Amino acid sequence: MARNKFQKQFIKERTTYLIREFFIQRGFHEIDTPTILTSLPLEPNLFSLKTIWTHRHLPFYLATSPESSLKKLIAQGIGNCFTISKVFRDLEDIGPTHNLEFSMLEWYEMGKDYYHLATTTENLIIDIFKGIEQKDNKRIKKILNYQNTPIDLTPPWPRLSLNDLFKEYAHLDLSQHLTVDRLLPAAAAKGYNIKGIKTWEPLYTQIFVNEIEPHLPKNTPAFIFDYPTQLSPLCQPCPKSPGFSQRFELYIGGMEIGNGYTELTDAQTLHQNFQNEETFRKSHHLPLHPPDQELVDLTRHFPDCTGIGLGVDRLAMLMANASRIEEVLYFPTSKLISVDK
């Protein structure tokens, strides 16, 4: 009875076990990263939840990702490492694929770039899929059936260029529309609502969601490579594509599963990126937390490496054929809200 009731949560449990097995077998250090921090990286569209340590009257902020904590250890020479941690995002509502607190896998590989990282990501997800199939005594195959759609996990998965996607489906050369002054009239010509919009990112998001996402492959996972630098403050720039950075996002079953990149190693650039975001938030009256100056300082000692954040709950949704994130969580935020009411 209990097994039937908790079957999809048990698949998340198995997913987490297989993640640990994958990295421990490869000699990665597992890190227990802090949940409450006094400062955080300043990144576009990542807003923190604030709490107060009443005893000392000190503000703390819930981690939006474990990135800064892991990078501080990497700068000190810890090497390949990973964590599975709880993270939190403010100014985002709960929904079918998002919970207020969620589990994130993050790992870093020394001396590698985002092309190598994509291959590691493929291997990890295929290993998890095989491990769950074996656990359930099913015949091992490479077809994941998710919400009545067969998804072929056979590698290599498509590597798509973001700018090529914009050219093909939005008929827009994104490299020529990296400022709000250039993108605003293009969005207006397409019929999008531009009233009151004074920044670039909302225009980009409207076009991406409506004109790019519907055309992403449905029967295979897909990596989208090379994102605008203004959306990627912690990424290494693309040497041959000004305005773009070495970042990919992984989509499976219509969901963004992971966000990976070649790491920025220039402390001065990182400091400037944080300053730019701080100025933007102040001018637009957006929530602000203290920028992580220690991370900036340690970036001066940062090795060449690559890293990714991957949503464990969404990955478990795929493995459990769950249409909503609540199905793989014991205590989703939606349940807590209904109890409070």
Image: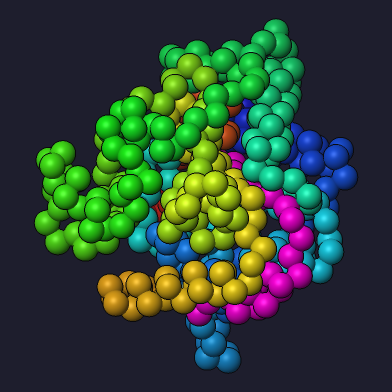
Q: Is residue 4 left or right of residue 190?
A: right
Residue pushed farthest bottom?
56
Choose between 324 and 303: the one closer to the eye: 303
Residue pushed farthest front?
240
Residue 290 place in picture, x, y as percent: 50, 79
Q: Residue at x 56, y 65 (%)?
A: 63
Rendered image coloring scheme? rainbow
State the quadrant of the C terminus. bottom left
Q: Residue at x 69, y 70 (%)?
A: 299
Q: Is residue 103 visible?
A: no
Magenta residues span 289-314
Choose between 11 and 143: the one closer to the eye: 143
Is 248 placed above or below 264 here?
A: above
Q: Is residue 235 left or right of residue 13?
A: left
Residue 266 place in picture, x, y as percent: 64, 67
Q: Residue at x 14, y 61 (%)?
A: 196
Is 152 placed above or below 284 here?
A: above
Q: Is residue 242 left or right of residue 107?
A: left
Residue 324 place in picture, x, y as percent: 42, 34
Q: Quadrant of the rendered structure where residue 27 is?
A: top right
Magenta highlight on residue 134: no
Q: Is residue 163 visible?
A: yes
Residue 163 place in picture, x, y as percent: 41, 38
